[in-house]
Amino acid sequence: MMGGGGIDKYLPQSADDGTVQTKVLTTLEQLELHVENFYQNSSSAGFKVSDAELAKFDSPHLPGPPASLLPNSKSKTALIKHYLTHFVVSSITTTGNNNPGQSLLPPEFVLLPNTAAAQLSNADQALKPGFYECLSRWRVLTAFLLPPPASSSSSYQTQRDVLINSSATAFSRAFAPWKVAKYADEDRVRSLCEIMKSAAELGVWLFAQPCTYEFRWAGLEDEKVGVGAQKRTTTTMTTTTMTTMVIAPALVKVGDERGRRLGEGQVMVEWVTQRV
């Protein structure tokens, strides 16, 4: 139970670990299945690769841009899974997204964390005492005070759906050379739109949690694997040769229900790797 007097009974309470794991795994698996259903390793005739279109889905966790990695990879679908999952996960979190205009979260959720990120990234600037505790409390209060994202009084859902449709269309166009031809483009875009809407709802739900969670694409060596953590692969990533790569990030609990940073993060969902 959070501290803060009598208002706590009105505020969102921490979900149990199993619920968090299930919700996150559902979204990550939907993204993976979307690629498996609608894309293939061989390229379709008549489609030219557009470097500019692919660059929109570039990832800082890979050693080069999509236009240079895809032609040389035996498993195009592994790379496509990474690009799609990275793009969607970045759009539903308040960290790791350098373009708030592409966020699928309500704008009120994004503005303050992006401003605060400057303090977090400045090694010469000491954090204010209680910084993380206050940020956690702010998230919960913001989620409570704002109208529900799906309510008729909120313009957020309309703006979100426009962004989702344009993003899904852009992704389908960028990776068209590797599409499975038996499916219509409309079906491919519609499928991704529905997954992205569910992902946006997950992002809103995680934001309102008193505990703090982060998606991690690397650096799990120093974190503790939590009891019941969902493990989906045993393959080890080899970054030097890139024989395997992370296609879906881990979810790590980094703050408790009072907002206090954990000395050792708790891995709730382990990352997924695949050979490339």
Image (tube, rainbow, N blue to C red):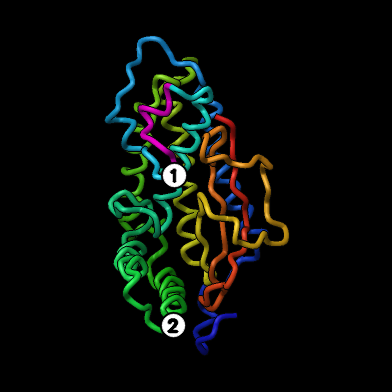
Q: Give the quarter of the figure containing the N terminus.
A: bottom right
Which residue is found at the position 45% from the left and 38% from the top? 84
Q: Which residue is mark 2?
A: 130
Which residue is found at the position 38% from the left and 31% from the top? 66
Above or below 151: residue 71 = above
**Label 1 vs label 2: CA separation?**
31 Å
Give the residue type that dot 2 points to.
Answer: Gly
Would residue 13 be seen by someone viewing this image from the given angle? no
Above or below 93: residue 120 = below
- Whole-percent x, y for residue 81 in the image: 50, 35
- Whole-percent x, y for residue 204 in the image: 45, 59
Q: Is residue 34 left or right of residue 109?
A: right
Of marks 1 and 2, the one in the foreground: 1
Q: Residue furthest right?
A: 227
Give the residue type that dot 1 points to.
Answer: His
- Whole-percent x, y for residue 22 in the image: 63, 52
The quadrant holding residue 257 is bottom right
Q: Is residue 23 left or right of residue 208?
A: right
Would residue 274 be seen by someone viewing this image from the given angle? yes
Above or below 233: residue 92 = below
- Whole-percent x, y for residue 126 in the image: 36, 78
Q: Characterize the local packing of mark 2: few (<14), some (14-19) or many (20 or more) Cα atoms within 10 angstroms.
A: few
Tell me where the magenta segment starts and ends, as one range.
Answer: 61-71
Looking at this view, is 120 or 193 the one in front?
120
Q: Earlier in the sequence, mark 1 or mark 2?
A: 1
Circle 2: element type? loop
Circle 1: element type? loop
Q: How many discs appear?
A: 2
Q: Residue furthest top?
A: 45
Q: Which residue is mark 1?
A: 61
Which residue is found at the position 52% from the left and 89% from the top? 5
Which residue is found at the position 44% from the left and 82% from the top? 130
